Image: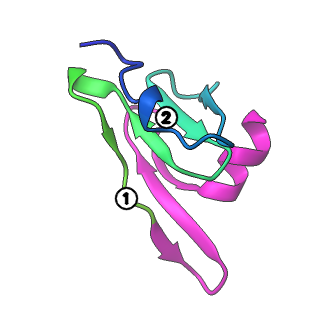
Amino acid sequence: MSKYNFLHELEDDEECLELKEHPGYFITTKGRVWSSIKGKGRWLSSYKQGKYYWGVMIGGKNGGNKLVHQLVGRNF
């Protein structure tokens, strides 16, 4: 299974890039995060973190809680 098999699910005005710090994870311009880790591939669930922000859990040795707006800002 290709790690890019999710690209057909993107909306017309949505772009996607692989995270620079976390290979195998992708962020879209709309803040959706795709994980291609362990071969399956899935959209990660985001959760409310604080009053105004959304977070996502990204695995790996450099992983942990990441704020979605920071991932978008650093990669686009």
Give the CA distance from mark 1 to mark 2: 19 Å
Provide the residue span drawn in magenta. 47-76
Viewer-nearest residue: 54 or 62:
54
- Residue drawn at the location 59% of the way across and 29% of the way down: 19
- Residue drawn at the location 28% of the way across and 31% of the way down: 41
Question: Which residue is identified by label 1?
Answer: 45
Q: Secondary structure at mark 2?
A: loop
Q: Position of residue 55 (x, y in %)?
A: 52, 63
Could you tell me which quadrant the N terminus lies in? top left
- Residue drawn at the location 37% of the way across and 50% of the way down: 44
- Callout 1 amino acid: Ser
- Mark sitting on residue 62: 2
- Callout 2 amino acid: Asn
**Is residue 72 one of those drawn in magenta?**
yes
Q: Mark 1 against mark 2, which lies toward the viewer?
A: 1
Could you tell me which quadrant the C terminus lies in? top right
Q: Secondary structure at mark 1?
A: loop
Q: Position of residue 49 (x, y in %)?
A: 54, 75
Viewer-nearest residue: 6 or 74:
6
Q: Earlier in the sequence, mark 1 or mark 2?
A: 1
